[in-house]
Structures are given as C-alpha cells and as structure tokens.
Amino acid sequence: MCQLAVVSRASFYRHWEQAAPDEAEVALRDAIQRAAVQHRFYGYRRIQVVIEREGFQVGVKKVRRLMRDDNLLAVRRRKFVVTSDSDHPFRVYPNLAEHLVLSDVNQLWVADLTYLRLKGEFVYLAVVLDAWSRRVVGWALGRSLESDLPLLALERAIVSRQPQPGLLHHSDRGSQYASGRYVGRLEEIGAVLSMSRAGHPWENGKCESFMATLKREEIDARSYSNMEELEQHIEEFIEQTYNRVRLHSALGYWSPEEFEARQARQKTTPPWLPAGLSFSRHEEVPPGPAPLSGDQP
C-alpha cells in the first residue's frame, strides 16, 4: 500500500502514532516515566533493560526518543579532582592489574579514597571493590586521611569475603595505601600488591567510576547536615541500591549481587582459582630470502 501511494513506511507509522496513540504506546510511555523517576540517573540503555524485564518489547532507540520527548534524559556533570599524594618515601609497586583476566570473585580488589563535602566540613570515604563483579566489599567514612581509614575499609572487606592467598590488591600510589600498616595487613592474608602509575587515574578506573556514581546519584542529590546522617545514607546506597539493585552495563545490565549469584550457579570450575594473565602479542615477521652473493647486507 505504501509503495502504491509512494509513501515511506516510516512516515505511515509515524502518522498513526501521532494521530492516535494506542493503549500499548501509552502503557510503554508510562513504564518509561516510572522507571526514569525511580532511577533518576539511569540513561536510556538501562531504562530499556528495566522496562524490558517488565515485559515490554522495545528497542533502545525508541526508549531514547520517548525519554528525549519527555525531557527525561539524564544530564551528567564531568569533572576530575586529584586527591592522592604519591610523593612519599614508601615503597611503590608496579601495575599488575592491567594484565589480569578475571573469572571469579576475590581475584582482584581495587581500592580508592575520595572526599565528600558537608555544610561545615570535609569528610573522607575509603572503599574496596571486587573488580570482577563491581561489588563494594568494604568501605569506611571518617574525618581524617590517615591510613586508619582505608585500613578499616580493608578489614571490613576481609571479614565479609575471607579471601584466599593469591588475591591481587590494586590502588593508587597514595601514602595511605603504601604505608607499612596497610601493606603489612595485605601481606598477612597472602595478597599481592599492585599500584597505578602516578598521574594515571584511569588505571584504577573501576573505583573511579564507582566514586563518580556515588557522588552523582547520592551525594549531589541532597544536602547533609552532619557525618552521621551522611554515613546512614551512604550505607543505604551501597548495600541496598548499588550492590543489590543498580544495573551495570559492564555486567550485562545486572546488579553486582545478581551477577555473582548467576555466575555461581553456572560455575563449573573449582571453588576458586587465581586470575589469568593476558599480554599483547606481536606477529612474528617471517625471515626473508637469503641474500645472493655480492648483494649488500
């Protein structure tokens, strides 16, 4: 019919969608709006996964178009603040994490520190993530940047996960992570240390990404009067939202808890194995023909 009328099919469908939206279209739009309000900082890809799990069959492009029409697309603020001081006398370690191929929990932990601003003071947050599942396995909030803060986050991670020897711990070169107490505790559990190069925050990208998510979706969304109130909301965000509910694109749009549970059910390997290594390989150049007599070398 469209060929006979010399009308494109896209124009035909667009006409009927604009003229008389059916009940299914209204229901889809309602589902998108509810998901966008419930998950304020989800982009259109995560929203598409959420409503697809509710039973709607819809593509990413259509979700993006409807969210744009309703002014629901998330707007993100990008900035980077340097908080680590790598100018210290402690021993530093090479970056071993960049070559790991992860296949299980407790193969690689990544740790980092950030500052949070209250009305009258600055406080600091230390976290430890399982790099394979992006799950926060330990965290601590305090008013000082001394090594006690990341050490407390590390202790909580050790208690909750009970890692076996062979775990690789990766962080930046900050003095807190290179201090004797922190390094000694890692050596006690048989962990191997790895550190990013100075001025290369992307080498600890998983932790940097979590910090950005925390600030964008929780810290910047409200004001806190004191550290006790902040700590309560951070615990709720990490334990109830980030680890259990929030969808991660790197995990196939599953939450860290769901991802670990699914992988545990499908696991066919022994209980725990250390991570593998992967190095870039160069193709061998085949030798050329042997030079003839009298040819220049």
Image (cartoon, rainbow, N blue to C red):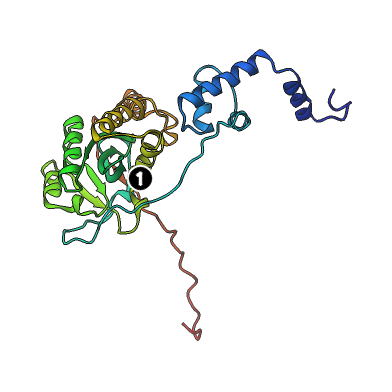
Residue 163 makes an appearance in the image:
no
Quadrant of residue 70 within the rendered picture: top right
**Location of residue 122 (image quadrant):** top left
Residue most toward the right? 4
Determine if residue 54 is in view: yes
Q: Is residue 234 left or right of residue 20?
A: left
Q: Position of residue 93 (x, y in %)?
A: 22, 56
Q: Does residue 247 sit above or below 201 in this rendering?
A: above
- Label 1 belongs to which residue? 208
Instruction: Give the class, few, some or many, for how many residues have Cα within 10 Å of label 1's Cα (few <14, many ≥20).
Output: some
Residue in view at x 26 percent, y 49 percent: 171
Image quadrant holding the N terminus, namely top right
Residue 198: percent from left, percent from top: 30, 59
Position of residue 139 relative to residue 57, above or below, is below
185 lies above or below 162: below
* Left-right relation of 34 to 80: right
Q: Is residue 51 left or right of residue 162?
A: right
- Furthest residue in direction bottom, as rendered: 294
What's the residue at 74%, 26% (across, down)? 14
Residue drawn at the location 60% of the way across and 21% of the way down: 29
**Element under disc 1:** helix
Farthest top residue?
23
Name the one closer to the observer, 41 or 169: 41
Q: x%, y% of residue 162? A: 17, 32
| Nearer-the-camera pick, 295 or 234 | 234
Question: Where in the figure is residue 168, as x and y percent of width and height?
Answer: 23, 44
Which residue lies at the image location 51% right of the left edge and 35% below the top edge?
A: 74
Position of residue 109 in the picture relative to residue 208 (left or right): left
Q: How many marks?
A: 1
Q: Nearer the viewer, residue 248 or 238?
A: 238
Dot 1 amino acid type: Glu
